Amino acid sequence: MGLGEFVRAAWAAGNLVVQPRMGFGSPESMRSGLRATKAVPATTVGTITLDSYTRVGDLAAAERAVLAGADLNGYPIVSHPVHVTRAVLDGVRDSGFPVQLRHGSATPQHIFAALIAAGLDATEGGPVSYCLPYGRVPLEESVRSWAQCCEFFAHLREHAPVEPNLETFGGCMLGQLCPPSQLVALSVLEAMFFRQYGVRSVAVSYAQQTNPRQDEEAIFALRRLCAELLDDIDWHVVVYTYMGVYPTTPWGARRLLAEAVALARATGSERLIVKTVVESQRIPTIAENVDALEFAGAAARTRPAPRPGVDPAADSQTYQEARAMVEAISDLDGDLGRALLHSFKRGYLDIPYCLHPDNLGRTRSYLDVDGALRWADTGLLPIGHLVPRRQRRQVSSAGLLDALGYVRRKYDTAGSELR
C-alpha cells in the first residue's frame, strides 16, 4: 500500500495520520527512529529526512562525513550503499507503515535515483518551494530538474504495485509571513506541475500560520481548489505544525501542536507533520519525536471525526485570491513549468521577504491586530482588485521583527497554565 492509499484508508476510518520530521546520519539510528515511530499508539508514517550536504549536492562532503563517522543532521542516502538503506527499511516499512523521504533540494536527481533504488515510493518538495527559500539555484534550473524527477518517479508505477506519492512543499514557503492565499496557490500549482509530468498521487501542504480562523479558511480554500482542478488524480491535505520562530517553552510548544491537531481535524485534513518541544533549541531525539507523535495522536482522538472535505461556504477572500493567482499563472503558458517561470518574472508570484534573485521582492505582508496575515503591498500579483487598499500599509524593520516573534510570544505566555 502506497502513502496516498494508506492515508485515504486512515481518513476513511476517522484517523489522523501523524508524522515526524526525523533524520539521523547513522543507519542504526535511522532504523531505530523508524521502529520507534511505527510503535507509537497512533496512525503514523515514517520519515527519513536527509542531511544538508546531500540536500545541496555536496556529495564529497557527505561521503567524508560517513567515512569519519561524523554526526550529520540527517540521513545521507546517496552516500550509503543501497543495500545499507534497504537494511534500514527491511522489516519496518510495510503496507501498514509507509516511509516518506524528505530532503529540501532544488536539483534532486541524485536523491530521486537513490530513493528509488532503495525501494521508496514517497517523497516531497517542488520546483518553487525547494528552490526559493534554500539558496541561489536559478529557478529555471530547478524547474527543469523537477520535471525530470517527476517523470522518473512516475515510471515507478510500471515496476511496483503502488502509486508513487509526491507531496508539494508549496504551502510552507519560508515558514511564516507569506499570506495564506499565496501558500494555497503555490501548493495547488506545484501539484498541477507534478500531474503534468505523470504523477497521479499527490499531497498538498499548508503550514499553520498565525490565526486559527484564517488557517481554517485557507485549508477549505485549498480543498475546494483541489476538488476543482485536481479531480482526475488522488490527493490529500497535509498540515504542518508551525514552521516559523517556535515557542521556547514546553507548554507553549505543546499548545501550538494541540492547535495544529485541532486545525487538521476541523478541516478534514488527512495528515499532520508534528514538531517537538525542543524545536527552538536543537535537533530532536527519537524519544522527543515519539513524545510529540503520542501527544498529537492522543489529541486527535479527542476531536470529532473529520468533516466533509470542502466547506460549502468556502468562497472566501483567501479562495478568491488563490483562485485568481492560479488562473492568471495557468493562462501564461500551456506548459506549467514555463508558466511558473513567467509568473515570477512578471510578479504574478512574488514571495514576501524572500531574497532569491528570481523573486521580484515587491510584495510585503503584516500581522493584523487579531494575528491574521494581511497584504501590506500586493506588488504585481493579479489580486490587486481583491485586496482593499485600506488594508495596505508600510512595514518597518521593527514591525517585521515583531511579527517574526509573534507566535513564540503568544504561546510561551498563553500556554503557561499547561506547565
Image (cartoon, rainbow, N blue to C red):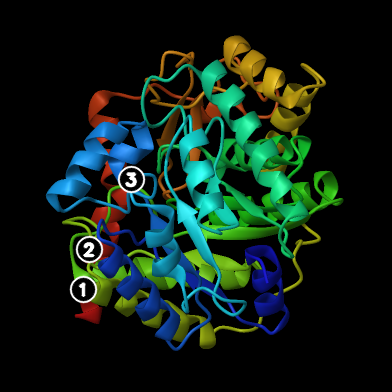
Q: Which numbered disc covers residue 412?
A: 2
Q: Which residue is mark 1?
A: 416
Mark 2–mark 1 contact, CB under 8 Å? yes
Mark 1 or mark 3: which is in front? 3
Q: Name the residue at 62% across, 84% down.
A: 304
Picture layout, residue 394 above or below residue 254: above
**Mark 1: amino acid:** Ser
Whole-Å distance between the Cαs marked 2 and 3?
Answer: 40 Å
Residue 66 horizontal side relative to residue 298, left or right? left
Real-space CA distance between mark 2 and mark 1, rounded to the nearest whole angstrom: 6 Å
Looking at the rendered structure, the secondary structure element under dot 3 is loop
Q: Position of 415 compared to 18: left or right?
A: left
Which residue in the structure is indicated by mark 3? 79
156, 243: nearer the viewer: 156
In contact (CB < 8 Å): disc 2 and disc 3:
no
Q: Which residue does the image show at 24% across and 55% down from the upper left?
A: 409
- Say which quarter of the image contains residue 330: top right
Q: What is the x, y in percent for residue 332?
A: 77, 16
Q: Which quarter of the figure has residue 3?
A: bottom right
